[in-house]
Image (cartoon, rainbow, N blue to C red):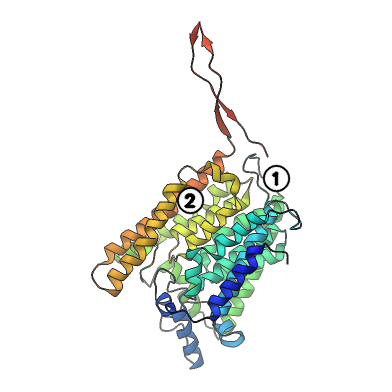
Amino acid sequence: MNTPPAFSVLVCLRLLLAVLPLPGQNLLKNDHQLSSPLTSYLRLNEGLWLLDNNIDPYVGGAFRHSPLLLSLFSTIVPPLPIVWAVSDVMGAWALLRIWRARQGLSSPKGTRSDVENLIVSVYLLNPYLLLPSLALSTSTFENTLTLLALMFASEGKVSSALLAIAFAVHLAPSSILLLLPILMVLVSSPVSHLASPRPFHGNVKRIPFLFGEFTLYWLVLVGAACIIAGGSWNWVRASWGASLMLPDLTPNPGLWWYFFTEMFDHFRPFFLMVFSVHLVIYILPICIKFQHDPLYAAFLLVGVLGTFKAYLTLADPGLFLSMISLFPEVHGYLRHPIITTLLHLHAALLLPLQHVLWVSEGRGNANFYYAASLVMGMAGGAGLVDACWAGMRIAVGDAKVGPEEKVDGEKGKGKVMWEVVQQ
């Protein structure tokens, strides 16, 4: 595997972090910003203990992971930090392969190693991704599966891409948002066409067959999960149902938990429906607007999940921030990157501070932590809106002021001319 120089160094460092004992790892495992009830390592360990003692892990309401993860860590490999390190390495490798496919490079020869070094660095050194992985949150596996699905789709490997996204949807049902853009990439191309929009040129007739293949893989995974769970369907409500019903209101950096903490039970079903539908309504508008570049549409939908997901962790916006390195053509068209960066820095400082004040010290209250969560939501929303703007603005081109002309012998104003960038 031909990789940039920084990749090997960063992989060694990441594996070293997995092997060496970290002084504050227990604090990371209990941090609500890094893991949610659906991705917590402590709850995964509890489920494994219940399984070893012949107790249904899904009865008590504490264990909410997929039976596939339960089977993986109870029979194949133990839940050791090295597994999370390997997942991080695979995610960085997939991100690099997506970049090469988008640039139309069939082989790594002639690639710019400095750019590829940057791409792997923004993934493996991203604190939003590194800290949840050190906390052994299973959101790391979800991000890796998402990147693998996009990588296989970009390289035209149909079955592998559909199987990867089927696994991702099984672990996190909200990943279904990425299915349509992945299908569009499979029938078209991952190469950038943001500067030259055109109607979708892929073979639309193939999409129903690809969707049928995805459904087949997903049903096989569901059947395997049911067999592992002993024929019981309790895991469906405990795992998938949690994203829709929000039974556990453990604080997290997302926007749902505090809203439903204050919600009267009478209105809860209606607003659960509203919040869930709110995620889905972004799929068609984004895929239609960016039909000429479905990989960019997938990137924007990752940003939607990183802002509005029910059980949000820092790994969700972290994936969006790392993926922006795949689209250097839009960087010059971002309107307020400094403001977005400052919002993320502000949230990164406020969230742990308010978490300690409220949960550890008992000197604050839920309002303080939710205020920091709102700052995180503003940062995610600002980045998402800015990325949408840049993806559309690049097609217009750069504004140039033309030479001043005389109108009826008087000096007139310069004309603004738009230079359309074609690719």
* Distance from Cα at disc 1 to Cα at disc 2: 26 Å
* Disc 2 secondary structure class: helix
- Residue furthest to the top in view is 409
357 lies left or right of 397: left
Q: Which residue is mark 1?
A: 201
The C terminus lies in quadrant? top right
412 lies left or right of 274: right
Residue 117's place in the image compared with 196, above or below, is below
Q: Which mark is residue 384?
A: 2
Q: Which one is in front, 384 or 111?
A: 111
Q: Residues within 10 Å of mark 2 (few under 14, many from 20)?
A: many
Q: Position of residue 352 (x, y in %)?
A: 36, 67
* Disc 1 secondary structure class: loop
Of badges 1 and 2, nearer the viewer stands 2
Q: Residues within 10 Å of mark 1 (few under 14, many from 20)?
A: few
Three-letter amino acid code at disc 2?
Answer: Leu
Residue at left 31%, top 70%?
356
Is any part of residue 146 visible from this angle?
yes
Q: Which one is in front, 144 or 166?
A: 144
211 lies left or right of 64: right
Q: Quadrant of residue 105?
A: bottom right
- Residue furthest to the bottom in view is 53
Q: Position of residue 8 (x, y in %)?
A: 65, 68
Residue 366's place in the image compared with 21, above or below, is above
Q: Which mark is residue 385?
A: none
Total numbered circles: 2
